[in-house]
Amino acid sequence: MVQKFHEEPGLLIGATLLTIDCEVHEDDALFVLVEELVINEWPTLRNKHPNRPRELLRSVIIDALKNMIEENPEAAGIVWNTAASPIKHGQAKLGKADPIVTQLIEKANCIVETEAVKRATLPLPVKKKKKRRKISSESEPLQLNGNIKSDDILQSITCAVAPQYPAGTVLSEANPHWPNTAGTPWPSEFIPRMSEAVANAVSLGNKKLAKSLEENLSAHLEDFAKRTTEQVEQTQQIRNEKAESRDTTRMKLDVLWWSEALYSPSKRCSYRDLKIPSAAVFAACDLTDIAPALSPTSVSYVLGETLYKLSRIMKSKGQKKLGGYLSQLAVEKHDLRNAWAQIKIFSTRCSLLEIVEETQEGMNPSTQELQMRTGVDPNIPLSPGEFAMWLFRDIQARRLVEVLNESKM
């Protein structure tokens, strides 16, 4: 099932909707898919369960979702954004799996909030910011050694001086004359041999010095390259942090500017010029163009406060039934095409966002149809801010599906 989620991230939305509602019909397409996977491992499943075992299949889905959210923050974001509003407004039916599902959703929320805050470079509540490692600019001094030992040149000097040394030891190619023998051509034999011995000694010292220099320079070059790499990496890290901070600051300013201006970039008019249901829809849409797909929870509350402020300005009533919002949108028939990506979720259950999309064609589902397709009671009261936040989370879930789809390429 986890592999299926990787192949088709849109499944995560349908799987979450099914997870938070124990009353989904056994013929739901997602149940059919999971049953096929289980039968591959348990061919006699239907011998023991004549009907499709919803609870067993739902437990498989829950476990697969648990693995996904632990593995990927974007997957956790899809689960959280899809489940948050139905749970908050009492539209989740968790059944016997209540403790497990509640824990799953809470964990997804924790993962999303931690990662979103981290990416937004906002201060984390507990963990301290990791300090950069100090890079030393000092290096070990060069240790060169070209010294030669007396034993290295003793043989050649001895050969230049006398035929034997010590007494009785015959030397090869040595001076055949003793220095204290009168009338012998000792100097003529000594000088060239001694010159060669000195030249060899100098050459030997140079070779040792060159070898020592090579070894030291090699070590210093490695150290220099290592420190240079560390400094380049740290410089790049600082540049990235500054870029992230700049982008985050810009995003925060853009959100605040948008909230204060009450202007819809997509409609090119003030939200005051729209009726409240339409303003809620377009405000949710506009905010997703400003905020990242994985956003801190506080971003959605900016949206809620913006709609609250707008409602007060327009002197609109506080809450309205969900069905009322949808009926108004069906009358106005706003063009929402291409506003959000279309995601295949492999389930007969759908999100509230899909219903809102259908209102652009003038469709207004009946109470029974809305309940059957979304599991949501159309009579629940919602403030404009709550309605907008619900849609915003549904849009964010789709955006995160797109992110996972792009990561496969």
Image: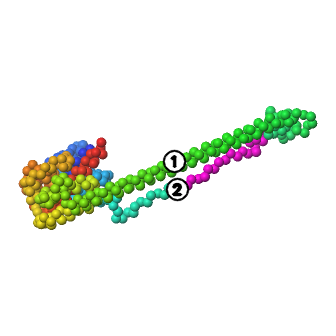
Is disc 1 surrounded by few (<14), some (14 to 19) or many (20+) residues within 10 Å?
few
Can see residue 268?
A: yes
Which residue, given by chain and number where applicable, does mark 2 sit on?
Answer: 136
Q: Which residue lies furthest to the right in this view?
A: 182
Q: Where is residue 370 in the image (x, y as percent from the top left)?
A: 10, 54
Q: How far apart are marks 2 and 1 (CA)?
A: 13 Å
- Please state if 105 lies on the left or on the right of 165 as rendered: left
Can see residue 377?
A: no
Q: Position of residue 233 (x, y in %)?
A: 44, 51
Amino acid type indicated by mark 1: Ala
| Of the pair 42 and 299, the residue shown nearer to us | 299
Q: Does the magenta stretch include residue 152?
A: yes
Magenta region = 136-156
Q: Where is residue 316 in the image (x, y as percent from the top left)?
A: 11, 65
| Of the pair 44 and 109, the residue shown nearer to us | 109
Q: What residue is shown at x 24% (from left), y 45% (from top)?
A: 8
Q: What residue is shown at x 63% (from left), y 50% (from top)?
A: 143
Q: If you read the primary sequence from the N terminus, does the residue marked by circle 2 or circle 1 appear first? A: 2
Is disc 2 surrounded by few (<14), some (14 to 19) or many (20+) residues within 10 Å?
few
Which residue, given by chain and number where applicable, does mark 1 sit on?
Answer: 225
Q: What residue is shown at x 23% (from left), y 54% (from top)?
A: 288
Amino acid type indicated by mark 2: Ser
| Of the pair 295 and 280, the residue shown nearer to us | 280
Say what secondary structure mark 1 lies in. Answer: helix
Say what secondary structure mark 2 lies in. Answer: loop
Give the quadrant of the C terminus.
top left
What type of secondary structure mainly makes up the magenta span? loop
